[in-house]
Image (tube, helix red, strand yellow):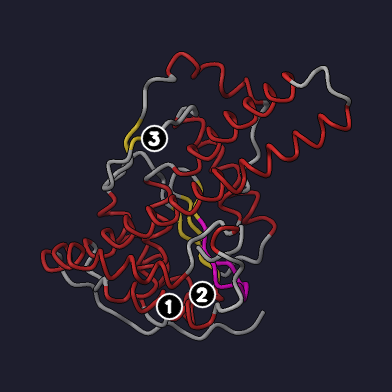
């Protein structure tokens, strides 16, 4: 959600070919992201992706301080369930939990597993702002971004391995330097831009979902404006996994007219202020 690398991306891959081998024959079968209709190459079967997500979610929740305070948990689950209904993915077993941590962040794992950190409550301010946060994370899950990233990792590893093999006649030190350079080039030239594009896609999907669920999409613009005001020491966007908050706010302005049409057709959700979490 924020500029940090959260637990969303910390899926441990099984040995590469144990996942990839059943899928190689389907290389040409691309999927399509919901709402944006972007073509995707995903080599991971969705059932495997969901199982990995459920396992990772259990591990994360076992290690982090999960809140059981109804004052914190109730708004997150109420908003989450409302957005999950309009997401209309009956194959997912949606879960929404709250983690007591001052970091302004949230994450989603495959299969509809979402967690929101208490540190984002002051920025969200109310349940409409919270809907922007949760909608973004539900957008990641719907678009199967984790499966896409795992597939990207498999392909990138294969490319770098082939590149290193092609340098077989070089000295080990030279091969190592070239391999590192190839990896750095791939990171800046492909991996990070791809990550930022997924974040922007989740922003768009989340905006549409919150509007369909009856939350005014203007709240998402306010959220990212507040992020931009507090997050002034970010690294250059070129080196970041997430777009700059100011860029995200500009995107929101472009998408608002479309989102407003969904909001006008929806049953309005009640908007309540969020509690101020106690410091852990």
In depth, the one of 68 and 209 nearer the eye is: 209
Q: What secondary structure prevails in the magenta region?
A: loop
Quadrant position of residue 169: top right
Label annotation for residue 40: 3
Q: Are marks 1 and 3 in contact (CB under 8 Å)?
A: no
**Whether residue 272 is situated above or below residue 2 in the rendered picture:** below
**Whether residue 249 is situated above or below residue 242 in the rendered picture:** below
Tell me which segment is drawn in magenta: 98-107
Residue 162 as seen in the image, left or right of residue 168 = left
Quadrant position of residue 189: top right
Mark 3 neighbour class, 10 Å CA radius: few under 14, some 14 to 19, many 20 or more? some
Of the residues tagged 2 and 3, which is closer to the observer?
A: 3
Mark 1 neighbour class, 10 Å CA radius: few under 14, some 14 to 19, many 20 or more? many
Q: Is residue 103 magenta?
A: yes
Of the residues tagged 1 and 3, which is closer to the observer?
A: 3
> Residue 72 at x, y = what percent?
49, 75
In depth, the one of 236 and 241 nearer the eye is: 236
Tell me the CA gap for discs 2 and 3: 30 Å
Tell me the CA gap for discs 1 and 2: 6 Å
Residue 242 as seen in the image, left or right of residue 126 = right
Mark 2 neighbour class, 10 Å CA radius: few under 14, some 14 to 19, many 20 or more? many
Outermost residue toward the top? 25
Q: Is residue 74 magenta?
A: no
Which residue occupies 56% across, 22% down?
20
The answer to which of marks 1 and 3 sits earlier in the sequence is 3
Q: Secondary structure at mark 2?
A: helix
Q: Secondary structure at mark 3?
A: strand
> Residue 171 at x, y = what percent?
88, 25
Residue designated by label 1:
124
Q: Are marks 2 and 3 in contact (CB under 8 Å)?
A: no
Quarter of the figure that contains the C terminus: bottom right
């Amino acid at each position: 959600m924020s500029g940090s690398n959260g637990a969303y991306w910390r899926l441990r891959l099984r040995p590469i070919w144990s996942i990839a081998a059943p899928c190689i024959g389907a290389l040409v079968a691309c999927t399509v992201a919901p709402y944006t209709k972007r073509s995707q190459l995903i080599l991971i079967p969705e059932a495997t992706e969901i199982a990995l997500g459920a396992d990772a979610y259990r591990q994360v929740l076992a290690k982090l301080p999960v809140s059981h305070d109804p004052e914190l948990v109730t708004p997150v689950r109420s908003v989450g369930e409302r957005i999950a209904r309009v997401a209309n993915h009956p194959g997912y077993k949606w879960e929404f939990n709250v983690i007591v941590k001052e970091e302004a962040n949230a994450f989603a794992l495959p299969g509809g597993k979402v967690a929101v950190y208490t540190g984002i409550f002051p920025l969200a301010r109310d349940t409409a702002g919270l809907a922007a946060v949760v909608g973004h994370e539900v957008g990641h899950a719907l678009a199967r971004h984790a499966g896409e990233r795992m597939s990207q990792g498999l392909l990138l590893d294969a490319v770098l391995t082939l590149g290193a093999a092609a340098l077989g006649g070089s000295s080990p030190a030279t091969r190592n330097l070239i391999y590192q350079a190839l990896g750095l080039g791939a990171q800046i030239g492909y991996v990070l831009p791809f990550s930022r594009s997924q974040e922007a896609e989740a922003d768009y999907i989340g905006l549409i979902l919150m509007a369909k669920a009856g939350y005014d999409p203007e709240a998402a613009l306010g959220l990212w404006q507040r992020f931009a005001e507090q997050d002034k020491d970010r690294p250059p966007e070129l080196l970041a996994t997430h777009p700059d908050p100011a860029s995200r706010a500009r995107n929101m302005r472009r998408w608002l007219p479309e989102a407003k049409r969904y909001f006008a057709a929806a049953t309005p959700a009640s908007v309540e202020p969020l509690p101020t979490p106690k410091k852990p």
